[in-house]
Image (cartoon, rainbow, N blue to C red):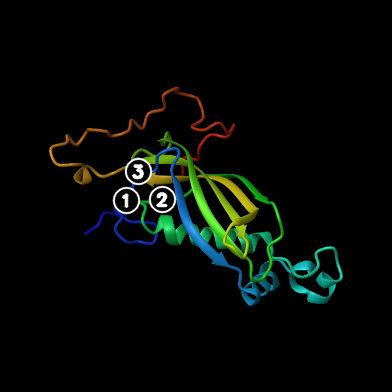
Amino acid sequence: MTAPDARSGTGQPAELFFEDLVPGLTVDLGVVTVDGDEMVAFARRFDPQWYHVDPDLAGASRHGGLIASGFYTVSLFMRAYVDHLLSRAAADASPGLEELRWLAPVRAGDRLSVRVDVMGARPSTARPGLGTVSLTGTMLRLGPDDRPEQEVLRTRFRGWFAVRPAEAEPAGASPDDDQPDASPTNPGQPESGTPAPEPHD
């Protein structure tokens, strides 16, 4: 039976662990197409501002038509992140979001290329057995030629990922080989550059 910390974010056996998410790694999360009906239904339920839900008012405004709720756009990012990375990785919870920016309007029919870049990684000071990975996610609108036209979303956040279990080490390796030290290098210092310490719950 697969141990809980060796399961992916969707519950399947994990194939990627903290050690695999090295700074500089870029993961392609695919291309999503904005469904107009879903976009408006989301806005009516969660963000019913007129430029998200009223086509007449939106069409007569500087927006020139309906635009997606930013929270719908970031939900599309999250789904791509789960489908293409967390479904394979030994993902735990996320300790926080540092930045979320909506850089350009998103509209029905837009095709958005999604990716995530690993910016940093270190053993967690709050959760032994986990590593904290700093990530930047972006969404880029594609043109008819499939070339990026404009960045529409950028987010910076952190995720916890389980370290590789000892039984998954290469043959002949000591159980302690390459295991990260969960103790902080500089006691009393936050794990990342943010002023708030990592949660301990």
Looking at the rendered structure, the kind of residue marked 3 is: Asp
Q: Residue furthest right?
A: 60
Whether residue 49 is visible: no
Tag 1 near tag 3, CB within 8 Å:
no
Q: Residue furthest front?
A: 145
What crowding class fits label 1: few (fewer than 14 Cα within 10 Å), some (14-19), or many (20 or more)?
A: many
Tag 3 near tag 2, CB within 8 Å:
no
Q: Nearer the viewer, residue 44 or 16?
A: 16
What crowding class fits label 2: few (fewer than 14 Cα within 10 Å), some (14-19), or many (20 or more)?
A: some
Closer to the observer: label 1 or label 3? 3
The residue singled out by tag 1 in the image is: 5
- SS at mark 2 in the image: loop
What crowding class fits label 3: few (fewer than 14 Cα within 10 Å), some (14-19), or many (20 or more)?
A: some
Q: CA distance from mark 1 to mark 3?
A: 15 Å
Q: CA distance from mark 2 to mark 1?
A: 8 Å
Residue 152: numbered disc: none
Looking at the rendered structure, the kind of residue marked 1 is: Asp
Name the N-terminal-most of marks 1 and 3. Answer: 1
The residue singled out by tag 2 in the image is: 92
- SS at mark 3 in the image: helix
Location of residue 169 in the rendering, given as x and y in whole percent from the top left corner: 21, 42
Closer to the observer: label 3 or label 2? 3
Tag 2 near tag 1, CB within 8 Å:
yes
Location of residue 89 in the rendering, given as x and y in whole percent from the top left corner: 37, 52
Whether residue 135 is visible: yes
The residue singled out by tag 3 in the image is: 20
* Residue at left offset 82%, top offset 72%: 59
Looking at the rendered structure, the kind of residue marked 2 is: Asp
- SS at mark 1 in the image: helix
Q: CA distance from mark 3 to mark 2?
A: 15 Å
Name the N-terminal-most of marks 3 and 2. Answer: 3
Looking at the rendered structure, the number of numbered marks drawn on it comes to 3
